[in-house]
Image (cartoon, grey):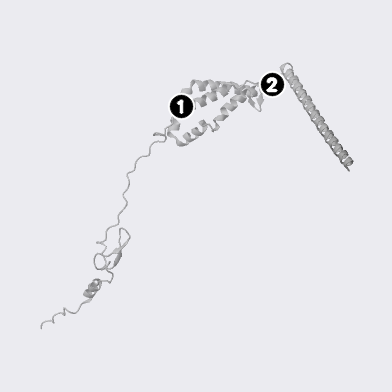
């Protein structure tokens, strides 16, 4: 007995699934419906009926790696600054300060100012003999070390701490004479300076007293004149009444 022929007009399970996906929607812009583009993540109409399989979807793209270039060495390029001039001036200022330290036979605790002044002058001589190498070495460090270069810029700037060097050099004569004064005997120049100061102080006090007396006299004269004017005005009013 032969098997009955299959009913080609009756849809099977697979046919129902396919036909349901082939239905046309009422939206004219998206006959097969809408979907989210896997690449642009934007909503767009489907190109074909049914859901696209994973094999048909475009694979996700990865951002291309930019070529890595080695960073330029610190201080290289057009902004490289020549520190030979400022560093040379700085070394010259330090040398002047060390060379001008007065020699005093005094001690501050266990520190001998005499020994310290001798060593300071010797250090100044070493700095002068090796000044060229110091300037070159400091420039090389500034060229390759950003932190050191930043500190050096502040040091040699007009508003930086470099003003301390000329200020110390200006104050050095006062400091030297003061140290010489306190280590010298009372007789001689010290006594003459003391008498000169006493005379200047007496002159200042006498001048201040004369100025004060003149101001007092002017004040009394003004009060007397005001009193006379008031008395004259009162007399005139009395006669008029």
Measure how far apart labels 2 and 1 are at the Cα level: 40 Å
- The quadrant where residue 171 appears: top right
Q: Which residue is drawn at 79% across and 25% down?
A: 206
Taking depth in this image into account, of 30 and 121 the one nearest to the observer is 30
Secondary element type, mark 2:
helix
- The quadrant where residue 217 appears: top right
Q: Residue at x 21, y 77 (%)?
A: 12
Which residue is at the far left?
Answer: 1
Give how far across and how far down residue 232 sits, in percent: 86, 37
Q: In front: mark 2 or mark 1? A: 1
Q: In this view, does 52 lie above or below 208?
A: below
Q: Which residue is drawn at 81% across and 31% down?
A: 216
Q: Residue at x 79, y 26 (%)?
A: 210
Which residue is at the far top?
Answer: 188
Which residue is at the far front?
Answer: 240
Give how far across and how far down residue 121 sits, in percent: 57, 21
Specify the quadrant that holds the C terminus: top right
Mark earlier in primary sequence (2, 1): 1
Q: Do the residues labelled 2 and 1 touch (CB within 8 Å)?
A: no
Mark linked to residue 84: 1
User: How many residues crowd around disc 1 within 10 Å: few (fewer than 14), some, or many (20 or more)?
Assistant: some
Q: Is residue 215 above or below residue 24?
A: above
Q: Is residue 10 above or below residue 178?
A: below
- The quadrant where residue 143 appears: top left
Q: For this view, does 164 lie left or right of residue 30?
A: right
Q: For this view, does 153 lie left or right of residue 185?
A: left
Secondary element type, mark 1:
helix
**Residue designated by label 2:** 181
């Amino acid at each position: 007995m032969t098997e009955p022929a299959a009913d080609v007009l009756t849809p099977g399970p697979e046919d129902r699934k396919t036909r349901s996906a082939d239905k046309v929607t009422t939206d004219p812009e998206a006959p097969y419906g809408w979907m989210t583009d896997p690449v642009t993540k934007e909503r767009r109409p489907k190109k074909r009926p049914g859901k696209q399989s994973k094999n048909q979807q475009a694979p996700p793209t990865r951002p291309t790696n930019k070529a890595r270039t080695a960073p330029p060495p610190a201080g290289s390029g057009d902004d490289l600054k020549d520190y030979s001039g400022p560093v040379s001036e700085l070394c010259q200022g330090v040398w002047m300060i060390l060379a001008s330290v007065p020699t005093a036979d005094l001690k501050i605790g266990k520190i001998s100012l005499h020994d310290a002044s001798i060593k300071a002058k010797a250090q100044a001589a070493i700095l002068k003999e090796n000044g060229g190498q110091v300037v070159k070495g400091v420039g090389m460090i500034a060229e390759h070390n950003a932190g050191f270069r930043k500190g050096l810029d502040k040091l040699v700037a007009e508003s930086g701490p470099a003003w301390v060097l000329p200020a110390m050099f200006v104050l050095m004569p006062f400091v030297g004479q003061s140290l010489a004064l306190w280590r010298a005997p009372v007789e001689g120049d010290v006594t003459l300076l003391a008498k000169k100061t006493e005379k200047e102080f007496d002159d200042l006090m006498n001048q201040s007293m004369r100025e004060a007396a003149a101001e007092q006299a002017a004040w009394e004269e003004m009060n007397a004149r005001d009193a006379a004017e008031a008395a004259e005005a009162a007399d005139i009013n009395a006669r008029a009444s």
